[in-house]
């Protein structure tokens, strides 16, 4: 038997999670040092990426964060799935990097959280991601009328 989580609590969780990724977006676009350490332009170069790649990572974070707060399982799944891919790359990068452990715990924790969010919003059918309303009422009237025709 599973406990039902109140709607307001789920909504608050998605907003807090999205806010964390918006902070990640802001720090990646910030030109100088952040409260997380040196500028991300420096960090990305140290990790072996071009400095401009931080904008790509930051933009993905922002888009996926926005998708998390749209009250639709379809959009939340797409946002969480995008973050799973981004965070898998971040975890891999941090495994190769020689930074202190306390600097490398955020990405794996967020990866686990976004995997759980993606699983919680998993679509019943993959076609629901493209065409969310596939019921019979969406069929054109003319096609439905032809079923009952005696011609």
Image: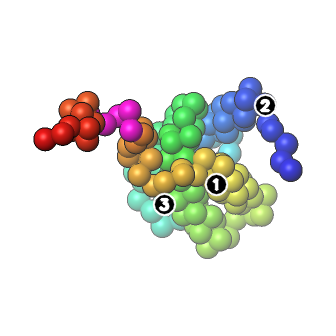
Residue to which mark 2 is pinned: 6
Residue 95 image offset from top left, x and y in percent: 65, 71
Furthest residue in direction left, as rendered: 151
17 lies left or right of 69:
right
**Residue at figure coordinates x 74%, y 26% from the top left:** 8
Q: Is the C terminus in the top left, top right, bottom left or bottom right quadrant?
A: top left
**Residue at figure coordinates x 18%, y 39% from the top left:** 150
Quote the CA–CA distance across marks 2 and 3: 44 Å
Of labels 3 and 1, earlier in sequence is 3
Residue 29 appears anywhere in the view: no
Number of the front mark, 3 or 1: 1
Magenta span: 136-140
Quote the CA–CA distance across marks 3 and 1: 34 Å
Of labels 2 and 3, earlier in sequence is 2
- Vertical position of residue 139 compared to residue 120: above or below: above
Q: Residues within 10 Å of mark 1 (few under 14, many from 20)?
A: few
Residue 65 image offset from top left, x and y in percent: 55, 38
Furthest residue in direction top, as rendered: 8
Residue to which mark 1 is pinned: 119
- Residue 45 badge: 3
50 lies left or right of 43:
left
Circle 3 sits in a helix, a strand or a loop, which is it? Answer: helix
């Amino acid at each position: 038997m599973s406990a039902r989580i109140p709607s307001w609590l789920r909504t608050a969780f998605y907003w807090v999670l999205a806010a964390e990724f918006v902070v990640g977006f802001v720090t990646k676009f910030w030109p100088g040092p952040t409260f997380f350490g040196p500028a991300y332009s420096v960090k990305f170069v140290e990790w072996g990426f071009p400095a401009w790649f931080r904008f790509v990572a930051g933009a993905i974070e922002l888009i996926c964060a926005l998708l998390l707060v749209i009250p639709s399982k379809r959009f939340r799944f797409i946002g969480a799935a995008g973050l799973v891919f981004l965070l898998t790359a971040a975890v891999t990068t941090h495994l190769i990097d020689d930074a202190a452990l306390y600097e490398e715990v955020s990405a794996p924790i967020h990866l686990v959280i976004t995997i759980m969010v993606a699983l919680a919003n998993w679509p019943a059918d993959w076609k629901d991601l493209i065409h969310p309303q596939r019921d019979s009422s969406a069929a054109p009237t003319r096609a439905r009328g032809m079923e009952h025709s005696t011609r």
